[in-house]
Amino acid sequence: MPTGPDEATPMRLRRNTLADQADRHYLYQESVQDTESEIDFVEETWAELRDRPAELLREDFCGTANTACEWVRRDPAHHAIGVDLDAAVLEWGRQNNIAQLDAEQQSRIQLLQENVLETLPELADIVLAMNFSYFLFPTRAAMLDYFRNVYDGLTDDGIFFLDAYGGYDAPREIEEERECDGFTYIWQQASFNPIDSMMDCCIHYEFPDGSRIDKAFTYRWRLWTLPELTELLSEAGFRDVTVYWEGTDEAKNEGNGVYEPADVGDADPGWVCYIVAER
Ligand SMILES: C[S@@+](CC[C@H](N)C(=O)[O-])C[C@H]1O[C@@H](n2cnc3c(N)ncnc32)[C@H](O)[C@@H]1O
């Protein structure tokens, strides 16, 4: 007779370390995403720029559709479409995020396993490309194709929201750690090629028992600059393209979470901003 769960469970199924028990999509959502602040910014900015409420939001590179879920939770008039190439991550989103919505909210969200370069669902009021996912397009031509497809996918007064990052630490081959609830998030800029601006980045997770998920997520992307991106958005047809820069909490000497339209930013080691492109 087995004396405990360890003996009853075949070796290959045993989950001994915290890393073995962890779910990388859950860790990603906890460490990387702040969907409430993101949708706060989107709603406030839309209200400043448009006289009608936005209803349909398309989340490109939606992954687990966490942000799309936040959008439909906010208002019974809100609908969302999430677009991602990866069937497995969409399925995780269905089982873990969409399943937590009530039936009525679930009826207002749709996930499409499609390429953002080609997708053309119902015209959206808002398209989101967040967490720099679109940096994966390595050339001006590919980025322009993407921006044109977003333009074609928006209503006449639609708005495209993107985030971007940079600063003098951005191209450096460095690692940064941040403590999260029950684990450490590690961001590694593993390589940077100054000739084509391509870089390899990884996310690792480490746990209090010393176990680790190495390369939980890896990204190969181009480190784009803001003028390159804003020029391409204009070229794609967007009428007004504005950078929203984060203000400073003078007492703490750090970002205050408030993003305002700006022509001049600070030459910080690391910054994140929003780009708002109006059709
Ligand atoms: C870093 S995740 C983004 C998750 C989430 N949007 C966020 O804000 O954190 C990038 C996602 O983009 C998806 N992806 C990559 N290329 C794509 C493409 N051409 N079309 C659609 N999805 C793509 C990947 O499958 C992955 O789930």
Image: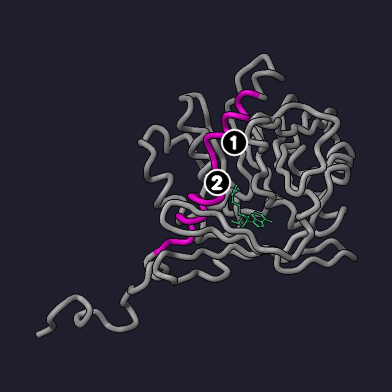
Picture quadrant where residue 148 is located: top right
Query: What's under tag 2, amino acid-wise?
Result: Gln
Q: Is residue 142 left or right of residue 190?
A: right
The segment highlighted magenta reads 22-44
- Residue that lies at the very extreme toward the front in this rendered image: 251
- Where does the image place residue 223, in percent across and percent down from the top left? 79, 55
Judging by the rendered image, the residue that carries numbered circle 2 is: 33
Type of amino acid under label 1:
Glu
Residue that label 1 marks: 38
Q: Are marks 2 and 1 in contact (CB under 8 Å)?
A: yes
Residue 7, image x, y percentages:
20, 82
| Camera-side residue of 136 and 236 | 136
Q: Please state which of residues 170 and 248 is positioned toward the viewer in this rendering.
A: 248
Does residue 125 appear anywhere in the picture? no
Tell me the quarter of the image containing the N terminus.
bottom left
| Residue located at (42% from left, 44% from top) | 98
For the point 79% across and 33% down, the residue is: 243
Whether the residue carrying mark 2 lies under 8 Å from ligand 1 is answered with yes
* Rendered location of residue 18, percent (x, y): 38, 67
How many neighbours does mark 1 have within 10 angstroms: few (below 14), some (14-19), or many (20 or more)?
some
User: Separation of disc 2 and disc 1 at Cα?
Assistant: 9 Å
Q: Is residue 62 left or right of residue 198?
A: left
Q: Is residue 155 left or right of residue 39?
A: right
